[in-house]
């Protein structure tokens, strides 16, 4: 009987400890520990130099993003520039082996992941956006105790954020892969090396794993926020018209 009572008290204590934190309290602590809600709310753009490694290869490039949903990724691959971008209306890409020398609208399946990206964190005014958040409990992520938070977007899509219980920053994001060869599996994005940029704490290192295997590593540097980024930067360049030949003999 004493063993049963002991187990009951341990269970009650664990439930009490969990209920001591609500989803909103964790989100509030996250904002407080990373610069403040108002700073996050006022953020309008981000620009960063990145180094990406995948499949034994390493590339350098630049990532631009601007509220509410514009994004552009430029990567140099063996001297050839690759681009993926979304200007708020059209997702486009330049990948010479696929598109030829001119930028092209991105195939629908590829474009979906670009067009659904939002510059603002899902926790900023989440209720106004139609998002819901739910604290699922505690879970260990690679030896670190975390709060597991379920985020359901207005469109019904779900992501899980894992917040470190000590510092209240997300150290992993889990989301289903919806297209490509890994469709149906979960992508786990690990966030680390938090550094301060103009009063905000941002993760400078990201590692993406699929099926427990590393698919990509991204290291950021030279991060700038709230820079003036012209909308033209994100727009697909128009193909220049070639002037017709005159047909006249120059001799």
Image (spheres, rainbow, N blue to C red):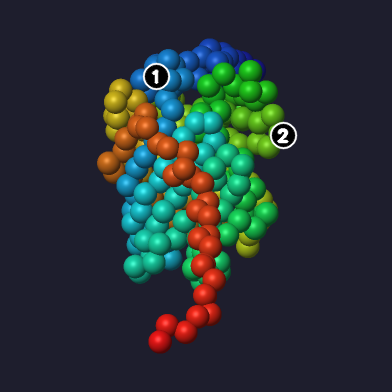
- Compare marks 1 and 2 and give the one earlier in the sequence: 1
Viewer-proximal residue among 94 and 159: 94
Q: Is residue 230 left or right of residue 22?
A: left
The percent position of residue 135, horizontal first and vertical second, equals 60, 24
* Residue 7 shows up from this direction: no
The percent position of residue 60, horizontal first and vertical second, equals 33, 56
Q: Which mark is residue 215?
A: none
Query: Which corner quadrant holds the C terminus?
Result: bottom left
Mark 1 surroundings: few (<14), some (14-19) or many (≥20) residues within 10 A:
some
Q: Is residue 59 left or right of residue 149?
A: left
Mark 2 surroundings: few (<14), some (14-19) or many (≥20) residues within 10 A:
few
Tell me the distance, in whole angstroms, between the alpha carbons under discs 1 and 2. 28 Å
The percent position of residue 73, horizontal first and vertical second, equals 44, 50
Picture mark count: 2
Viewer-proximal residue among 156 and 107: 107
Query: Which corner quadrant holds the N terminus?
Result: top right
Occupied quadrant, residue 142:
top left
**Which residue corresponds to the image point at 57% horizontal and 18% vertical from the top-left?**
125
Dot in front, 1 or 2 = 1
**Which residue corresponds to the image point at 68% horizontal and 54% vertical from the top-left?**
108
Indicate the secondary structure of the residue bearing disc 2: loop
Occupied quadrant, residue 229:
top left
Indicate the secondary structure of the residue bearing disc 1: helix
**Are the residues tagged 1 and 2 within 8 Å (C-beta)?**
no
Q: Vertical placement of 52 versus 43: above or below?
A: below
* Residue 238 shows up from this direction: yes
Q: Which residue is mark 1?
A: 39
Q: Which residue is mark 2?
A: 156
**Which residue corresponds to the image point at 43% horizontal and 65% vertical from the top-left?**
55
């Amino acid at each position: 009987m004493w063993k049963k009572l002991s187990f009951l008290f341990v269970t009650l204590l664990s439930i009490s400890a969990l209920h001591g934190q609500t989803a909103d309290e964790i989100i509030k602590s996250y904002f407080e520990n990373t610069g403040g809600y108002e700073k996050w709310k006022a953020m309008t753009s981000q620009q960063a130099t990145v180094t990406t490694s995948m499949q034994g290869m390493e590339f350098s490039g630049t990532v631009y993003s601007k509220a509410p949903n514009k994004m552009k990724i430029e990567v140099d691959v063996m001297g050839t520039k690759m681009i993926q971008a979304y200007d708020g209306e059209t997702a486009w890409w330049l990948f010479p082996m696929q598109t030829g020398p001119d930028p092209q609208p991105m195939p629908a399946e590829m474009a979906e992941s670009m067009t659904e990206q939002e510059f603002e964190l899902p926790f900023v005014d989440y209720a106004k956006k139609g998002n819901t958040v739910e604290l699922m409990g505690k879970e260990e992520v690679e030896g670190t105790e975390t709060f597991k938070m379920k985020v359901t977007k207005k469109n019904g899509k779900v992501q899980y954020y894992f917040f470190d219980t000590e510092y209240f920053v997300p150290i992993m994001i889990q989301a289903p892969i919806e297209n490509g060869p890994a469709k149906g599996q979960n992508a786990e994005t690990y966030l680390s090396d938090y550094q301060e940029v103009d009063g905000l704490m941002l993760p400078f290192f990201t590692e993406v794993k699929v099926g427990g295997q590393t698919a990509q590593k991204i290291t950021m540097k030279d991060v700038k926020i709230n820079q003036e980024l012209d909308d033209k930067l994100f727009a697909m360049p128009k193909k220049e018209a070639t002037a017709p030949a005159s047909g006249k003999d120059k001799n």
